[in-house]
Amino acid sequence: MNFTSIEGREVQSQHWVSVNVSLFIGIARFLNKKTFDDTSTPLAVDSEVSIKEAAPLDTNSNVYKVKKADGTIVIVDRSVLHHHVFTPLEI
């Protein structure tokens, strides 16, 4: 991916500097869509998940304690959790 980045060092446009930039992006693994979309299979301890949305808890449902990135723990229903399982890139 190539593009031009404009760096504004001064307020007036005649002092701006254009810099060409090239980004080389590589993908080493893919998220397994089938597992990600499954919201009913039991999860193992320490599984990496994302929470789809906050939903009211049903006391008769399958609930999980989830430790968020900031360290807080929330209790959520399994139906709103997406399991992160990665598939290596095949070359």
Image (cartoon, helix red, strand yellow):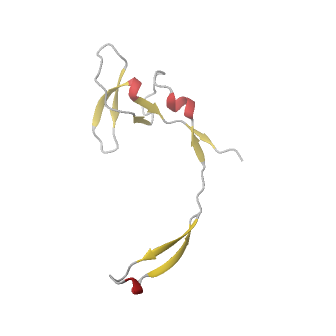
Q: Is residue 86 left or right of residue 54?
A: right
Give how far across and how far down residue 61 sits, in percent.
35, 16
Farthest-out residue, top: 60
Q: Is residue 55 left or right of residue 49?
A: left
- Which residue lies at the image location 46% right of the left edge and 25% below the top edge? 39
Q: In front here: 39 or 62?
A: 39
Farthest-out residue, bottom: 14
Determine the image quadrant of residue 6: bottom left
Considering only vertical position in the picture, is 19 above or below 32?
below
- Quadrant (top left/top right/bottom left/bottom right) for the N terminus: bottom right
- Which residue lies at the image location 35% right of the left edge and 33% below the top edge? 53
- Which residue lies at the image location 54% right of the left edge and 30% below the top edge? 35
Q: In front here: 82 or 44?
A: 82
- Which residue lies at the image location 29% right of the left edge and 35% below the top edge? 73
Give how far across and how far down residue 43 sits, in percent.
45, 26
Determine the image quadrant of residue 59: top left
Determine the image quadrant of residue 16: bottom left
What is the tally of numbered marks visible in this picture?
Answer: 0
Farthest-out residue, right: 91
Considering only vertical position in the picture, is 41 above or below 49?
above
Give how far across and how far down residue 14 sits, in percent.
41, 86
